Amino acid sequence: MNEKTLFQMALGLSEPWYVSDTKFDPTLKRLDIYLDFHRGGTFSCPECGTSCKAYDTEEKAWRHLNFFQHEAFLHARIPRIQCRDHGVRMIEVPWGRPQSGFTMLFEALVLMLAREMPVKAIADLMGVTDHRIWRVLTHYVEADLERQDLSGTTAVGVDETAARRGHDYVSLFADMGAKKVIFVTEGKDAATVEAFAEHLEAHGGTAAAITEVTCDMSPAFIAGVGKHLPQASLTFDKFHVIKTINDAVDAVRREEQRTEPELKSTRYLWLKNPGKLTVNQLARLLAFPQRKCRTARAYRMKLILQEIYRLDHREAEPAMWGLYQWAVRSRLGPMAAFGKMLRRHWDGVMRWYATRQTNALLEGLNSLVQAARTRARGYRSFQNFRTMIYLIAGHMGLLPT
């Protein structure tokens, strides 16, 4: 077996293709492999598959996976055929896609690395520009989105994530059943829900089929769901409700510490649950009188809310109503505001007991996205950020075959 036969087997070439020559330059650290086709070989029309003979050829080259530490390139004269029905066409070769300049195996490696590495690092490793790497990633993501089937989607979660420092956000929509991001769009207003509904309709789904939406209490998301997903019931994530009461407790503490200096530097005592405090922290917390300390009263409401989330629906509704009444009558401004919020969003808060849906999935996907953004030190454009979100959180079947 000579090196030509070996490379031919390694590349998986079949008739009429064969390796005609190889050139290795150790000084340039480069391997060039030349491919050709046997005289009289026939090729399929890319439009209809009709077998045709070569009309003429055009020289092309593709970057391949490194041969050990050496860059490798494939070279071939690509036939054009003259189909009776479709005229002159350039054939498609089995080792690379049209207009790519990379082999399929090279692109498959890029896709796998991109889930773990910044694109700039991949480009440096491969010895190509990051623009070319982004073109590969975008091609496969967009091709997968074209094939996306959302006909079975009935429950979605929506959350926003920061695109860069400042106030630039993108909204992520996830299929709660499939546990993956299915749509990404700029902004965090009601228009994002409209854009999702249009995307849904374009990929086999219907807005009317969406019966459950999980989100935070963003007025924009609520308005968008009401208008564009009219059959959906809203579930407000219990962790966002608990976060809201935590913020209210901290607001009470900040107000009270103006007259009670001992409350300074105690923020995390009130944010943690008693079971997660050290012995010294718990002793310090208990030192604040329950009746006289306004922060301690607010903290007690927070603990009761957490207990209510452990009840079943039948027990939870009267308990939640009691908490609402206590909060609005507490004469603690932030807690009264929390109570009014609870009343305003009552159906969505109580809906959690029926669906048990939370945004934990989206929070987890969001953390992956932000970790990638941190590794990359940001992205040049929304398009690049969108591509990376789909790649990381969309569980897409991207590898070329």
Image: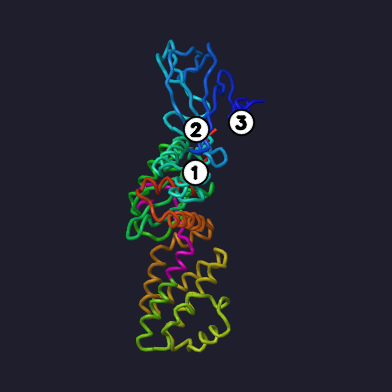
At horizontal 62% and vertical 25% (from top left) the residue drawn is 5
Q: Which residue is mark 1?
A: 153
What residue sits 42% from the left and 76% below the top?
249
> Of callouts 2 and 1, which one flags the residue occurring earlier in the amino acid sequence?
2
Q: Is residue 160 above or below residue 396?
A: below
Q: Amino acid at mark 2?
A: Phe
Q: Earlier in the sequence, mark 3 or mark 2?
A: 3
Q: Nearer the viewer, residue 113 or 272?
A: 113
Residue 125 left/right relative to 382: right
Name the element at disc 1: loop
Q: Cβ–Cβ below 8 Å for labels 3 and 1?
A: no
In front: label 2 or label 1: 2
SS type, badge 2: strand
Which range of residues does the magenta coloring cover?
Answer: 223-244
**Front residue of this view, candidates 119 and 30:** 30
Q: Nearer the viewer, mark 3 or mark 1?
A: 3
Question: Helix or strand or loop: what does disc 3 sit on?
Answer: helix
In the figure, 182 relative to 258: above or below? Answer: above
Which percent across, then down, holds residue 98?
A: 44, 28
Q: Quadrant of the N terminus?
A: top right
Q: Which residue is mark 3?
A: 10
Asked if the magenta segment contains residue 188, the reply would be no
Q: Residue 105, how many percent across, how many down?
A: 54, 36
Tell me the tag on residue 73.
2
Q: Amino acid at mark 3?
A: Ala
3D distance between C-alphas at marks 3 and 1: 42 Å
Total marks placed: 3
Left or right: 14 in relation to 140:
right
Q: Amino acid at mark 1?
A: Thr
